[in-house]
Image: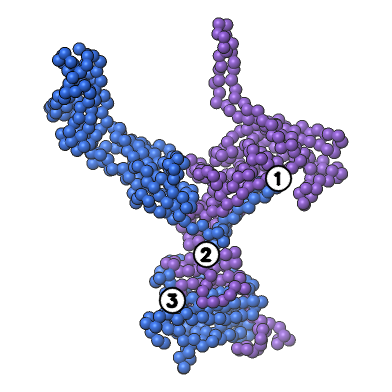
Chain colours: A purple, B blue
Amino acid sequence: MIFLSKEMFCADVMSVPCTPTDLDTITKIELSGGWYDDLRVTQNVTEELSSEINPYWDWDTILHAKFNGNTSAGNVDWNYQEVSHLLIKRKNTDEFQWITLDVRKVSSIEDFNMKNIDLTAVPNCEYQYAAVPIMQGMEGFYFQDSVFVRSHSLMIADRDEVWCTNITDNFLDNTSVVPNSVITTMYDQYPTIVSNSAANYEEITVNAQFFPLNEDMCSVDLQDDKQRIAYNRRAKLFLRNGKPKILKSIDGSVYLVYIHRPPSDTATDNYQNRKLSFGAVEIGNINSEEDLWEAGLISESVTEEWWNR
Amino acid sequence: MPKPQINKILPFDACLGAVVSMSYIGHLPHANRIVIYDAATLRVVYDETKNGLALEHTIPPDTLKNGTKYAIQGQVFDSFHNASPLSDKAYFYCLAAPSFYFKDIQNEDTFHSASLYASLVYEQENGENIDEFRFYLYDDLRNLLTESETFFTAENMNYAYRGLTDDRFYYLRAAGSTVNGIPLDTGYIKIFVNYENPKDYKLIDAQCNEQNSVVTYQTNFVVINPSDTEAEYEYRDGSINLIDRTLVYDKDFSVSGDFTLSIRGTDMYRNAVILKCSDNITSLTLSSYIYDDGQMRYKLAVSNGLCNYLLYSEPLAPRSDDIVTIHIRRVHFVYQLKCFVEKQSATGGEQP
């Protein structure tokens, strides 16, 4: 048995063609005995071996030390003691102003890896996302990626939930509100306008149907009343949960809103074909970090000191 | 005849002189006179009459002294040779022209980062304080992109220009004034931003869910440092000296399954253990042996429970400056050892 298992009495060069070894996971590497300019470990076992070592970090790379004046073996030459915070920012590619979406205080290696979602990107625009380390109180390099944002459905979300539906007229009919009074006087031909409020916002009317979708995101099962009613009820609870929301249509209209007129649930043609209609009022500027932060739509760690203004 | 009035005089550098002007309502003037006093002693330091219709008077360079406050009165002589009374005294300072510029940023400089930390220098030899200033950023067509808030003290002379785009020209500028109104302006400083943004591997990855336009972002930073971060090593031309020293990585990474491990170095003709990989119980060891014939072989020994699984390289005889590349590849726990020697010029290094 001992010959057939992983245990061997002895082993030497060419002793068996395929020798099992019991070193599984390497967690320690010690290097000595020369002048070295490269140490690299990769999971790629198909690349051609030559006198050159691939200089680029890729998704298979586990460790790569290039010894350019330091011993860092990661894809950035910091250590977590040097970096106090890691910021995630984004901006529209055509604009200059960044918005900070997330901030993490770095106290361990794990803090370098952040994953989160951005609810505020406007459809039909290209955005740049940047990870920015803060070192000695100053911003370091902007590591960037670009993404073109598209949307196939009406989306409404708060800090906890994202709902979307493509069964909508997508009209988002809206009315601008600028309060003022028109006062006619006895002797003047024209009225006097009194406008003593800075209020200037929009009210939006939304009509949409929320039906449970299958995994392919397009099949609507109207016949399953139990599932449909539960889903519709959850949608209505979400719409009247009192939290600030972001409302986006497929054409790129975006509003930071509060649902001030709760959904009315009406049926058309038959009882299963139900439509929700609700009113939203604009409560902030979608491009303002302060407004987004107060609405809870960007990370609560993005306090005033991180706003880009 | 009415009194003329001296128009406001901003502080100016006495070495450069200045033009002062006055206002007057009355008959057409044909001459004007200014009298300048030392404001502290009221001693007359300059008294000059100038013919002409223009109610302007040039104070010649080096007539006054910087760091001094002066009083000035003006007088107008009209075309009927009537002399107006002297105007009320107006006061002004002569102050050396301040220096106001960006430290360490020159026109046409190139910056290899998306952020730029600009430090302003303000110097004024007569103790004139700065009053307020702002930082500005313009695009390559001098359209204003962003401006800072207004700063009021010299303690805020640093500013971070952030989010600069790769491969673009920008103009930096700062402008403000001193407490007595001397305008300050660095002028437009043209810079070029050029940095490497790796395309093949993204340290941040953003993906859009096209169903709902929600963007998911994820960072991919890998930070690996040796266990002894305090140790100091000798570096030369992008290489580290590990002769008689050991560099140990033992945290923040793990290698399981198939892998390729590569090292490359020089000065490797020696009997030594050069690489050890382990899980703290079992290990893989790469060592070099010089045989009696002067040839050297690398031996890879991998623990297999009772003894070692061994592989030997082809014989090598690298000179000290030859570049040796060694690859260890593991596929399904079967190992491969491959070495390459890149000969350097015959003049360099010593023969083994």
Residue at mark 2: chain: A
Residue visible at 56% across and 71% down in the picture: A41
Marker disc for residue A74: 2
- Horizontal side, residue B86 vs residue A86: left or right: left
Label 1 lies in what chain? A
Decide: is A31 above or below B314: above
The picture places residue A1, in percent across and down from the top left corner, at 73, 86
User: Which image quarter: residue B176?
Assistant: top left
Whether discs 1 and 3 lie on one chain: the answer is yes
Which amino acid, by three-letter code, is at mark 1?
His
Query: Is residue B323 at all visible to an observer of this figure?
Result: yes
Residue B337 in the image: above or below residue B206: below
Give the alpha-carbon distance from disc 1 to disc 3, as whole Å. 57 Å
Going from the N terminus, do you reach mark 1 or mark 3 first? 3
Q: Which residue has dot 1 on it?
A: A152
Image location of residue B123, percent across then percent down = 28, 43
> Is residue B228 visible in this depiction of the protein?
no
Q: Nearer the viewer, mark 2 or mark 1?
A: 1
Q: Secondary structure at mark 2?
A: loop
Nearest to the observer: residue B306 or residue B140: B140
- 3D distance between C-alphas at marks 3 and 2: 20 Å
The amino acid marked with disc number 2 is Gly
Residues at discs 2 and 1 in contact (Cβ within 8 Å):
no
Task: Report helix, strand or loop for mark 3.
Answer: strand
The one of A306 and B82 positioned closer to us in this rendering: B82
Considering the numbered disc 1 on the image, is that residue within a helix, a strand or a loop?
A: loop
